[in-house]
Image: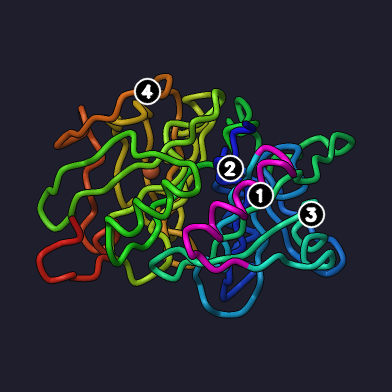
């Protein structure tokens, strides 16, 4: 049977207060390409038509998590799995698929109410090389591993794990509770070219997601962004460190919409057997008032 599961976080749609501010931040600090088409604003990190669409609606939150499956056949299986499990989903029309530059797309919500879109066949603009927003030492690491990863808002960890397992992901790693941070489950695709994790759940947040991680080929692009953030009005939320799960050297910083961006490099091949741990090997010191705890909602006893 076709492997129907989600292969990657392929795109996101963000509601923002200022496209002008996002254009400056995403290009000059993150190195993304910004372009406009038919009056709409997009960000790109590779040859895919876009990875992020910006909509100036003042919400400063995510309007859609776009999760890719490998093919039309996989989407048909996904639809029947969702129906069997009693999850409501809607097939979006051709105009809505075109707006996302994908062949077909369905829309649903996860148990926390996060807007999920599952699609196949994104448009790849092979004719349009990436024009990074600032000089970079290397490329973004995307391809079949997608845009990056996120921590999504969760009201009930078990319900969220069950839901993302239904989408074909499985927990590969758990962080144990530390201070105000409850346990987080990191969900991995079974695709052979997968990223360590696509989506993590466990934090009850005031926004729909806590951070987007984007990965770069060259360590110097992490440190270049780090220097640029230090000279900007944006704040380092978690300083340079290495993660226990994906092994990446990364740091986190605030964005014009409040949620965080993580830029990471390197790491190790995704593990196949699930584990748990209590902390990172080194670094990732939190700046009080800017870190992930900024969005944490007290769940009265923790999410885990
Ligand atoms: Fe991360």
Instruction: Indicate which quadrant contains ligand 1.
Output: top left
Q: Residue at x 41, y 24 (%)?
A: 270
Which circle marks residue 101 in the picture? Answer: 3
User: What is the chief secondary structure element of the magenta stretch?
Assistant: helix
Residue on which the image places disc 4: 272
| Disc with the residue nearer the chain's start (4 vs 1) | 1
In this picture, residue 83 sits left or right of residue 156: right
In 3D space, how far apart are the residues under numbered discs 3 and 2 (Cα atoms)? Answer: 15 Å
Above or below for 16 versus 5: below
Q: Is residue 132 visible?
A: yes
Q: Which residues are magenta?
A: 70-89
Q: Is residue 140 visible?
A: no
In 3D space, how far apart are the residues under numbered discs 4 and 1 (Cα atoms)? Answer: 27 Å
In 3D space, how far apart are the residues under numbered discs 2 and 1 (Cα atoms)? Answer: 6 Å
In this picture, residue 40 sits left or right of residue 119: right
In this picture, residue 303 sits left or right of residue 200: left
Tell me the quarter of the picture where residue 289 sits. Answer: bottom left
Q: Residue at x 80, y 40 (%)?
A: 124
Mark 3 Cα within 10 Å, few/some/many (few <14, many 20+)? some
Which circle marks residue 147 in the picture? Answer: 2
Residue 76 position in % (x across, y down): 68, 49
In 3D space, how far apart are the residues under numbered discs 4 and 3 (Cα atoms)? Answer: 32 Å
Above or below for 206 versus 243: below
Foreground mark, 3 or 2, reads 3
């Amino acid at each position: 049977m076709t492997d129907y599961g989600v292969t990657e976080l392929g795109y996101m749609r963000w509601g923002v207060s200022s496209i002008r501010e996002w254009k400056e931040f995403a290009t000059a600090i993150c190195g993304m390409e910004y372009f406009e088409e038919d009056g709409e604003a997009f960000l790109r990190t590779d040859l895919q038509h876009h990875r992020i669409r910006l909509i100036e609606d003042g919400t400063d939150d995510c309007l859609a998590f776009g999760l890719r499956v490998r093919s039309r056949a996989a989407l048909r299986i996904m639809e029947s799995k969702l129906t069997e499990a009693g999850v409501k989903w809607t097939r979006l029309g051709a105009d809505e698929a075109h707006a996302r530059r994908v062949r077909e797309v369905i829309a649903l919500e996860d148990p926390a109410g996060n807007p999920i879109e599952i699609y196949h066949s994104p448009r790849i603009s092979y004719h349009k090389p990436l024009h990074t927003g600032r000089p970079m030492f290397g490329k973004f690491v995307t391809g079949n591993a997608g845009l990056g990863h996120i921590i999504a808002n969760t009201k009930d960890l078990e319900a969220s794990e069950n839901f993302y397992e239904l989408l074909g992901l499985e927990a590969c790693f758990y962080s144990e509770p530390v201070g105000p941070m409850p346990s987080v489950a990191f969900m991995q695709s079974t695709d052979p070219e997968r990223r360590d994790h696509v989506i993590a759940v466990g934090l009850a947040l005031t926004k729909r997601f806590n951070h987007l991680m984007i990965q770069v080929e060259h360590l110097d692009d992490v440190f270049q962004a780090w220097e640029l953030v230090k000279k900007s009005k944006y704040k380092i939320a978690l300083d340079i460190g290495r993660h226990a799960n994906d092994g990446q050297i990364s740091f986190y910083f605030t964005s014009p919409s409040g949620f965080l961006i993580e830029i990471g490099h390197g790491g190790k091949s995704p593990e196949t057997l699930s584990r748990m741990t209590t902390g990172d090997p080194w670094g990732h010191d939190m700046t009080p008032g800017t870190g992930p705890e900024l969005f944490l909602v007290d769940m009265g006893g923790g999410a885990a």
